[in-house]
Image: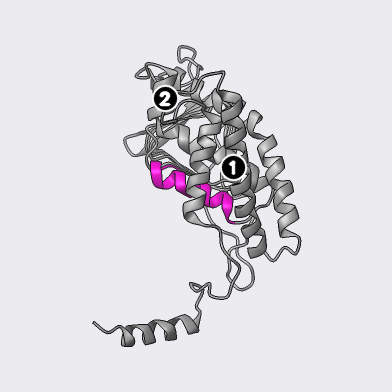
Amino acid sequence: MPHDAIKKALLASYALGGGINHLDGANLPSQDKVVELARDLMHLLFPGFFEDSGLTQAEAPAWLDQMLTKVEKRLSAEIEKCLRYAKDADAKAKAEKLTADFLSSLPEVRRVVQTDVAAAYTGDPAARSLDEIILAYPCVLAISLQRLAHVLYAQKVPLLPRMLTEYAHERTGIDIHPGAHIGEHFFIDHGTGVVVGETAIIGQHVKIYQGVTLGAKSFETDASGVPIKGIKRHPEIGDRVTIYAHATILGGDTVIGAHSVVGASVWLMHSIPPHSVAYYKDTSLIVRPRKAHELVLDGADWSI
C-alpha cells in the first residue's frame, strides 16, 4: 500500500523536534556495538568461560592480543562518538587516550571482580562451584559491567557508561548506575528488581537480595523546578551489611552502619547505627542493637 500520507506525517513530526529527533546531529554510539563491546569485555575478565571452544594457557597470549586489539578499536570508536556528541573538539585524540587508560584498568577491575565471585560462593549455600557462579549467576554480569562502566564514568565519558549498565539491566533485571561506588566482595543474591542509584556508596562485604532499592528520597530543584544534577541523593551502606529482599533505603544523608542487617520489605529514610537490626514487628519498624548471640559474619542468619 502507498505510504505517502504516513511519510508526510512522520516528516512533519520530525521537523517539530521535541527531544526525540537526532537528525543532523553527531553520530551516536551504536547499541549493537556496545552490546558486542560488553560481551568482549566479559571475555577479557573471564577468559575461557564464554569461548566457543576451550582456551589453553599456551593459547592465551595470542588470544589476548587479538581480543585487546578488537576491544581497543571498538571502544575508541564508540568513545569518540560520545565525545563528538558532547562537542569535544579533540574527540579523536582524547578517545585514544581514554581507551588506553581504560584498558590499563582491566587487571585491577578483574582483581576486584574476583572478590565478587568469591563473595557469591561464600554467601550462597546453593552454589556448588565458582564456575557455576560465573556461568549462571546474574549478579556476575551486572556487577562486572558496572565496575567497567564506573571507570568510564570516572573518565567523564558521556552516554557509554550508562549504555553498558543498561545492557546488564536488560539481561538481568539488576539496575546499577555506573556512578555508584561499590566496595570489594559485593554479592547480589537472585537479583531481579535491584536498583542502586548514581550517588550510592556501598562498602565492602555487602550482600543484598532481590528487589532492594538504594534510591533518592527527594530531588533538589533549581528556580525553574528542574532537578539539580550531581548532588548526593542516595544512601551509604557500611561494610558487612546484609539487606534482605524488597527493602527500600532512601536519601543522600541516610547511612546504614557497618555490620547491620536490614530485614525484608523494610522502608528506611533515616540512618541506623553500626551493629543494628531493622525489621517490622506487626506494622511497627523496630531498630535495635544486635544481640550477643547474633553473629556478625557476612550474610549470617539473624534472629529477632
Q: CA distance from mark 1 to mark 2?
A: 25 Å
In the rendered image, the quadrant that contains the C terminus is: top left
Which image quadrant for residue 10? bottom left
Which image quadrant for residue 267? top left
Relative image position of residue 158 (x, y in whole percent): 62, 56
Residue 240 visible, this orientation? no
The secondary structure type at the circle numbered 2 is helix
Question: Which of pointers 1 and 2 lies earlier in the amino acid sequence?
Answer: 1
Q: Nearer the viewer, residue 230 or 149?
A: 149
Magenta span includes 266: no
What segment is highlighted magenta in the picture?
A: 159-174
The secondary structure that most of the magenta stretch takes on is helix
Relative image position of residue 297 (x, y in whole percent): 50, 16
Residue at 58% across / 65% down in the picture? 27
Between label 1 and label 2, give the one nearer the viewer. 1
Residue type of the residue flagged with mark 2: Ile
Which image quadrant for residue 115? top right
Q: Is residue 233 above or below residue 118?
A: below
In the rendered image, the quadrant that contains the N terminus is: bottom left
Q: Nearer the viewer, residue 126 or 283?
A: 126
Q: Which mark is residue 268?
A: none
Which residue in the structure is indicated by mark 2?
133
Q: Nearer the viewer, residue 25 or 236?
A: 25
Question: CB under 8 Å between callouts 1 and 2?
Answer: no
Which residue in the structure is indicated by mark 1?
71
The secondary structure type at the circle numbered 1 is helix
